[in-house]
Image: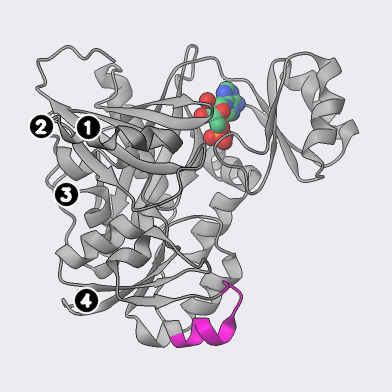
Amino acid sequence: MQHLVPGSVIGILGGGQLGRMLAMAAAQLGYRSHVFCPDAKFPADQVTGLVTRAEYGDQAALRSFAGSVDVVTYEFENIPVETVEFLSTNVPVYPSAKVLEISQDRLHEKDFVNQLGIATADYAGVSSLEEARVALEKLGCPAVLKTRRLGYDGKGQVMIRTPEELEAAWQKLNSDQLILEGFVSFDKEISVIAARGRDGEIRCFTPAENRHKNHILDTSIAPARIDEALHKEAVAIGSRMIEALNYVGVMAVELFVSTDAPRLRVNEIAPRVHNSGHWTLEACATSQFEQHIRAICGLPLGGVELYGQAVMTNLIGEDIRDYEQLMQDPAANVHHYGKIEARPGRKMGHVTRLYDFSEKLDV
Ligand code: AMP
């Protein structure tokens, strides 16, 4: 199969830290990157010479962007599907518009996962308060009411502990495109970062264990501390999903390790590199960013074996003030995303440490 030769240009939609780290991985392999982003200033801007600042609906800008790149990818899933469809008529785009569409809607996403015979939380799409009442009676409390679209980091969702709380939750979300999910009682949250090449080869990184603070990812620990059978099953789920989607690139699958059967339930998929895979930068021969670039450029996938246990901690908002102190620790691999303003909840950087497999982790 033809792969893109070094010197080719990779178009990246979105210019955040994920776009920045993709551009850095592309540069390592001899590719140039052209970032398309509506913002005035963005983290990927600092590491790539080719930039288009325009809205995602700007067809003239998209046409000219498509003409200047050899392949297009994206670093976040809230790009309009129409943008990806428009670009796809001129240049290969990975992952496809179809994948993007499924991942943008929690109801379509859960339907897709269940059609594959893979478990999720119990759920129902609801478009009126009356429908939500009926669904809540079936699913029971506690439950979680969520917007079908555009939710992230705990935004766009409300926990319902008693039936009396439903109406207020409905008013708060203020939409008729909602999904009600049964609450999954879980031991852990894990994720699998899976990759599929243009030739159909699939490789998955080891599942990581994820902890959140204020609904934002705080720490990822790899490998996840779950038994061997669950490890294998999580990887099998990642592989089945990426295959079924005929996907090209890196995809993250977030799962609950439920306290009762079925033990593994998919929470959501992200059609992109993912925060819970940043530890691959130091812990594996190939990072998730390089793997994604390899996949979309038609190169063979790289090795995913783990060199040791890895603990990645996000530096959120003011945490970035620890930067100088972290630099004193020779074991800390510190990443700063080049953002100047440390707003609360903003992902400013991360730090990864590796440990021997024999070491008992204190996290
Ligand atoms: P989400 O935006 O769907 O990823 O949800 C954010 C976080 O809320 C998840 O990482 C879970 O910790 C929690 N959560 C979401 N949905 C459920 C559910 N159905 N059962 C239990 N916890 C949930």
- Local packing at callout 2 (Cα closer than 10 Å; few below 14, some 14-19, many 20+) is few
Query: Which residue is denoted by mark 4 in the rendering?
Result: 4
Instruction: Write the residue at 34% across / 53% down.
Output: 338
Tell me whether the residue at label 2 lies in contact with that at label 4, contact meaning CB atoms closer than 8 angstroms: no
Secondary structure predominantly adopted by residues drawn in magenta = helix
Inspect this view and state whether residue 121 appears: no
Q: Earlier in the sequence, mark 3 or mark 4?
A: 4
- Res 120 quadrant in image: top right
Amino acid type at image mark 1: Leu
Q: Looking at the image, is 42 positioned above or below residue 191?
A: below
Q: Earlier in the sequence, mark 2 or mark 4?
A: 4
Amino acid type at image mark 4: Leu
Give the mark toward the camera: 3 or 1. 1
Tell me whether the residue at label 3 lies in contact with that at label 4, contact meaning CB atoms closer than 8 angstroms: no
Query: Which residue is denoted by mark 1 in the rendering?
Result: 326
Disc 4 is placed on an element classified as: loop
Q: Position of residue 125 (x, y in %)?
A: 73, 39
Query: Which residue is denoted by mark 2 in the rendering?
Result: 330
Disc 1 is placed on an element classified as: helix
- Distance of mark 1 from mark 2, alpha carbons? 8 Å
Amino acid type at image mark 2: Pro
Residue 211 sits inside the magenta stretch: no
Query: Which residue is denoted by mark 3 in the rendering?
Result: 286
Give the mark toward the camera: 2 or 3. 2
Q: In the rendered structure, which segment of residues is drawn in magenta?
A: 55-64
- Distance of mark 2 from mark 4, alpha carbons? 37 Å
- Distance of mark 2 from mark 3, alpha carbons? 22 Å
Residue 63 sits inside the magenta stretch: yes
Residue reaching furthest right? Answer: 130
